[in-house]
Image (spheres, rainbow, N blue to C red):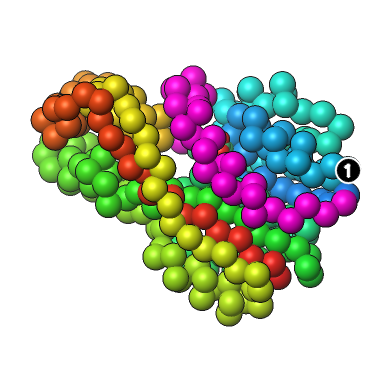
């Protein structure tokens, strides 16, 4: 997927909030071996490493665009590699901590994916993950609605992106069924106040809209963007716009 760190970073402070909640769940132990799946620009990987003195943290991501910014956050504790999460999970490497902030939602079938992730955790190690669960919001349902109507449906060859994110109790069950203890799973609203509907568009264009626009030829892409913007402007006429963004935060020890 064609990530753009500048667009993504437009709402950097808002996107940092869940990370600070997530890091509260990390058990600080000396000299652990940790991985950050879908580390993006690496800024938060470095913050994770700073909270884990004497540990090594490896950040992996499939996007060269995002990783281009990561060298600034590299040090003797932190390293980065261009790799998909799927490739990483296929290797035999095991970790004391598998951490991931806002990336696992891009991978499908969480019922089978999570057991694979858990199998890469050393005995006594921890899984700590945050994923957006905002897929019932107008911003997301409208993307699917547009993608399934003409002329976009044909141009997208029927593609839609249905969120793989499960109800929170399902993650609890998966953790328990795979030997998890100290299980925490909760959903939280992050109350963002944005200037107007166009700011909401800017937010979505940095993430959920990417899989659609990257598949469209230029003329249809512009029409998709204009139609989507118009729907947002009609739905959110007020200023500011309240964007209650729902996220799922989870941790367990295995
Ligand atoms: C929303 S960003 C989050 C980045 C970072 N964790 C943060 O919190 O700032 C999602 C990241 O997941 C990466 N990603 C998505 N699917 C991936 C996959 N299958 N393998 C590796 N990285 C992936 C993207 O390239 C992107 O950098």
Tell me which residue sits at (69%, 53%) in the image: 26
In x, y percent, where is residue 93?
78, 57
Q: Relative to 133, does residue 75 appear above or below in the rendering?
A: above
Magenta stretch? 1-30
Tell me which residue sits at (64%, 35%) in the image: 44
Pointer 1 residue: 54
Q: Is residue 8 left or right of residue 35?
A: left
**Magenta stretch containing residue 13, yes or no?**
yes
Q: Relative to 93, does residue 221 appear above or below in the rendering?
A: above
- Asked where in the image residue 223 lies, by quadrant, the reply is top left
Q: Is residue 55 left or right of residue 13?
A: right
Quadrant (top left/top right/bottom left/bottom right) for the C terminus: bottom right
Q: Is residue 98 left or right of residue 192?
A: right
- Asked where in the image residue 47 lies, by quadrant, the reply is top right
In x, y percent, where is residue 54?
88, 43
Local SS, label 1: loop
**Magenta stretch containing residue 154, yes or no?**
no
């Amino acid at each position: 997927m064609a990530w753009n760190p500048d667009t993504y970073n437009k709402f950097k402070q808002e996107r940092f909030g869940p990370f600070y909640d997530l890091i509260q769940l990390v058990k600080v132990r000396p000299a652990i071996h940790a991985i950050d799946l879908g580390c993006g620009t690496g800024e938060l990987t470095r913050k994770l490493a700073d909270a884990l003195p004497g540990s090594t943290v490896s950040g992996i991501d499939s996007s060269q665009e995002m990783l281009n910014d990561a060298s600034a956050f590299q040090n003797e504790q932190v390293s980065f590699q261009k790799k998909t999460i799927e490739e990483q999970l296929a290797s035999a490497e095991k970790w004391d901590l598998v951490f991931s902030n806002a990336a696992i939602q891009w991978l499908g079938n969480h019922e089978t994916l999570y057991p694979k992730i858990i199998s890469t955790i050393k005995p006594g190690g921890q899984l700590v993950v945050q994923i957006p669960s905002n897929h019932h919001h107008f911003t997301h349902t409208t993307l699917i609605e547009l993608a399934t109507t003409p002329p976009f449906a044909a141009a997208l060859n029927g593609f839609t992106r249905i969120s793989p994110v499960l109800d929170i109790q399902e993650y609890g069950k998966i953790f328990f069924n795979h030997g998890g203890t100290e299980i925490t799973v909760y959903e939280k609203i992050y109350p963002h106040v944005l200037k107007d509907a166009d700011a909401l568009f800017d937010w979505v264009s940095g993430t959920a809209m990417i899989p659609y626009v990257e598949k469209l030829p230029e003329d249809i892409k512009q029409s998709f963007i204009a139609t989507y913007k118009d729907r947002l402007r009609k739905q959110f006429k007020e200023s500011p716009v309240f964007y209650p963004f729902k996220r799922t935060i989870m941790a367990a020890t295995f």
